[in-house]
Amino acid sequence: MGLSFCIKDEANRQILADCVAGTMELSIVEITIRRLLAQLDGSLHPEAIFCSDQCMHYTHPKTRLQIQEAGFQQSVSRKGNCWDIASKESFFGHMKDEMSVRDCQTLTKVKAL
C-alpha cells in the first residue's frame, strides 16, 4: 500500500512538494514540508497559510512546530468541513483516474510516477 502526501499552491493549483511512503508515519509530512521549503528557497510569502484537515499528522505538536518555524500560519479545517482541502482531494481523484493500476504494482513504481 502506498500513501501520498502533497502540498498544493491554491493560487496557481500547482503541487509544490510531495512524498510517497509505504506506511502512514509522521515522517511523511515532515519530509514533504522540508521538500516544500527547499523548493521555495526562502521565498515564502509573509501571509502564506498552511491549510490541512484534522489528520493526526498535521495536528501533531512536532508538525505544528515545523509549520510555525517555516513561517506559515496554520489553518486546520473544522470537523466535517471538506471544502478547505477539496481541491487537493480533487487532485488525488483525478490522479487516480489517470494512473494505470499496472503502473502502480510496487511502491518504487509509484514513486517513479
Image (spheres, rainbow, N blue to C red):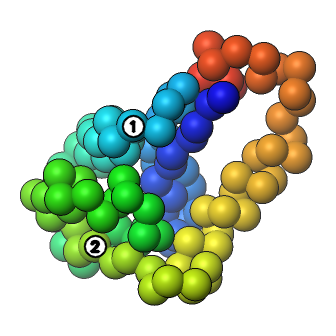
Which is closer to the viewer, label 2 or label 1?
1
Disc on res. 86: none
Q: Earlier in the sequence, mark 2 or mark 1?
A: 1
Q: What's under tag 1, amino acid-wise?
A: Glu
SS for dot 1:
loop
Between residue 38 and residue 83, name the one nearer to us: 83
Give the residue at x 39% y 37%.
25
Taking depth in this image into account, of 112 and 58 the one nearest to the observer is 58
Tag 2 secondary structure:
strand
Where does the image place residue 84, in percent across and percent down from the top left? Answer: 53, 79
- Give the percent coordinates (x, y) of residue 34: 27, 40
Quadrant of the drawing holding the N terminus: top right
Looking at the image, how many numbered discs can be counted on the residues?
Answer: 2
Identified at 28% across, 73% down, the residue is 74
Q: Is residue 54 above or below residue 67?
A: below
* Alpha-carbon span between mark 2 and mark 1: 20 Å
Indicate the position of residue 66 as horizontal and vertical percent values: 17, 53
Residue 43 in the image: x percent, y percent?
23, 55
> What residue sits 47% from the left and 38% below the top?
24
User: What residue sits right under mark 2 in the picture?
Assistant: 74
Camera sees residue 67? no
Is 97 located above or below residue 59 in the figure? above
Quarter of the image that includes the C terminus: top right
Query: Residue 72's quadrant in the figure?
Result: bottom left
Residue 21 vs 56, above or below: the answer is above
Question: Which residue does the numbered mark 1 point to in the structure image?
Answer: 25
Q: Residue at x 64, y 73 (%)?
A: 86
